[in-house]
Amino acid sequence: MVRMVGRNGVGLEQGLKQTMNWKRWRVGGLRVATVALAASGALESHGIGAQNAARRGAASGGAGAGAAPTFHRDVVPILQKHCESCHRAGGIAPMAFESYEGTRPYAAAIRAVAQDKSMPPWFAVPQIGRFSNDPSLTPEQIATLAAWADAKAPEGDAHEAPAPRHWAESWSIPRPDVIVPMTQGVPLPAQGEIAYTYEIVPTRFKEDRWVQMAEVLPSLRANVHHAVVYIRPPDSNWLRHAPVGEAFTAETLSDPEDRRGAHWTDNDVLLVYAPGSSPDAW
């Protein structure tokens, strides 16, 4: 069972694909040997002043003492680590920060969102603890981005830039044992609000399997906002009257219990995908 949301402004031609690799994690009534759930969704569609302090070595994301930060030496390492998971060619963000030419026009905006901590997005409460996948910028990195914008975004020497980061366009996990594709595309309007869209994807397993890894692989990342993969055992009453193998929303369901189920469930979640997320392994 996949719940997905796409970006406004495009038509989702193929929806997510899911995959499986066998091994260890029992999936609610199925036993799934290594399920590496992969998804592939083809979507068709289309200031604040900075302090001059905290300019530290490039390794820590800051410029050398007394020198204005430059794009290649000081800004690129920060962008690669914290921003390019979304802000890259083909990514979910509307602009790519992989080159000086593509980034410089947004220097002031980058400074603003870094200082107000709205980017990179992270919604966990800081007082709860430290998460290993927290993408938040350090105070030094925020100061570097702000100082770079205040210095009118100098480019610097391209030879000082780190090697470009290469992003996996296919599986990050080993080759999946099973790929379960979504069976129907979902059209996305060019504008307006998009309702949560669901598709029940049968695995056609003849026996229980154990899950070892799971990954969602969009085939057009720019249009997949996020996806949630649920476990729906064969005897489940959740969305019992919903269509199998075709996309639907809560509003298109006629059964009142199914409509309620589309808005809330306590069924097991196998995997959640969002730009920058990592595959799960158990």
Image: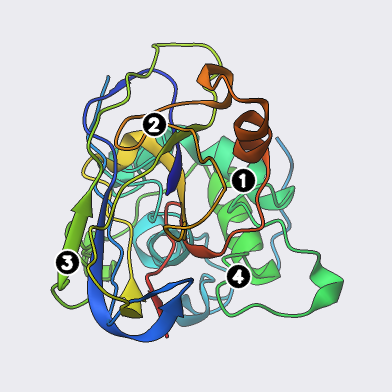
Q: Nearer the viewer, mark 2 or mark 1?
A: 2
Q: Between disc 3 and disc 4, whose residue precedes? A: 4
Question: What is the distance, in whole Å, between disc 3 and disc 2 at their CAs?
Answer: 23 Å
Q: Between disc 3 and disc 2, whose residue precedes? A: 3
Q: Are marks 3 and 2 in contact (CB under 8 Å)?
A: no
SS under mark 2? loop
Residue indicated by mark 1: 111
Q: Are marks 2 and 4 in contact (CB under 8 Å)?
A: no
Q: Are marks 2 and 1 in contact (CB under 8 Å)?
A: no
Q: Amino acid at mark 1?
A: Arg
Which dot marks residue 243? 2
Name the residue at 40% across, 69% down: 278
Across and down, in percent, residue 61 comes to: 51, 72
Q: Amino acid at mark 2?
A: Pro
Q: Is residue 37 above or below residue 44?
A: below
Residue indicated by mark 4: 134
Q: Nearer the viewer, mark 3 or mark 2?
A: 2
